[in-house]
Amino acid sequence: MDEVARYNQARWKALAAANALFSRPRLDLDTDSARAMVDPSCSYGDVSDKNVLCLACGGGQQSAAFALLGAEVTVVDLSPEQLERDAQIAEHYGFDIRIAEADMRDLSAFHGKGFDIVHHAYSLNFVPDCREVFSQVAAVLANGGLYRFAAANPFTMGIKQSDWKANGYTLSEPYAEWAIISYDDQDWVYDRDATAKIANPVEYRHLLSTLINGVIDAGFSIRNVSDNTDMHPDPQAEPGSWDHFVAFAPPWLSFLARLEN
């Protein structure tokens, strides 16, 4: 385990202990809310009996949703504390979910498994080189399999909602590959009043050209790109608020790709 993995594992241990938003198992899902969580645009189609890998998806959320939709689910995460949440939802719903601790940069235990879908929660920017991950995903997907991943919008990385200056949000970080970006967690990530200080996330900028060319070079064709994922932009909201900020500087992108090898 390298320093990048050690940092991420320690941070997610602390976030899980703080009951952070992405560490709260979803024990209240039905099929409609499950689909809204993992496939609101119905890009995957019917996933019943599909072999799905939830990559870096520990926390008892996406794995529960796919299992409720009838998929055969494997969840992989670097954090044992996050994976405990997936074990909790498996027991709660009575699902048979396979759980494995692994780094997204090394999925060798699953090479050749032929997953139909790899659903990759936001985490790609926690590692320096996204191309390492793309090649690993290609090695575990079946030909024609679908890969959905979220990534930071490389053009807005480093901008914070608190950076509002009279007429706009200030862009101050250079647009450079592998640039290290660290920032304070948003207020909604965890309850600071009840929690000791948690180390800030450390992320690495992946240029848009690297994201696009990297996934193509790994054997994928890009089927869809969204730049308005899980957000409620409102340019009329209070400047410096989250809804106002994402109307001007959308922080995330979502890609759907198909393995064509």
Image (spheres, helix red, strand yellow):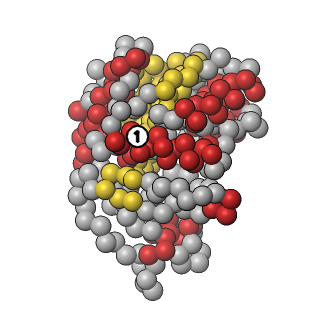
Residue shown at the point (65%, 48%) measured from the top left: 19
Is residue 49 toward the left or the right of residue 124 in the image?
Answer: right
What quarter of the picture does the N terminus occupy? top left
Seen in the picture, residue 238 relative to 139 is either above or below; the reply is below
Is residue 131 toward the left or the right of residue 46 in the image?
Answer: left
Residue shown at the point (42%, 14%) measured from the top left: 113
Residue shown at the point (53%, 75%) measured from the top left: 240
Residue shown at the point (63%, 45%) measured from the top left: 17
What residue sits right under mark 1 in the picture? Answer: 6
Observer able to see residue 43:
no
Q: In front here: 252 or 55?
A: 55
Q: In front here: 182 or 130?
A: 182
Task: Give percent across and percent down for residue 66.
Answer: 61, 28
Helix, strand or loop status at disc 1:
helix
Question: How many numbered circles does the render carry?
Answer: 1
Seen in the picture, residue 72 relative to 106 is either above or below; the reply is above
Q: Quadrant of residue 47?
A: top right
Q: In front here: 220 or 1?
A: 1
Is residue 7 toward the left or the right of residue 40 in the image?
Answer: left
What quarter of the picture does the C terminus occupy? top left
Seen in the picture, residue 210 relative to 2 is either above or below; the reply is below
Task: Give percent across and percent down for residue 135.
Answer: 29, 28
Q: How dense is the environment of label 1, judged by Cα within 10 Å: few (below 14), some, or many (20 and up)?
A: few
Is residue 71 toward the left or the right of residue 223 in the image?
Answer: right
Task: Give percent across and percent down for residue 46.
Answer: 59, 24
Amino acid at pointer 1:
Arg
Task: Give percent across and percent down for residue 256.
Answer: 42, 37
Q: Residue at the front extreme?
A: 196
Q: In front here: 153 or 89?
A: 89
Q: Quadrant of residue 86?
A: top right
Observer able to see residue 253:
yes
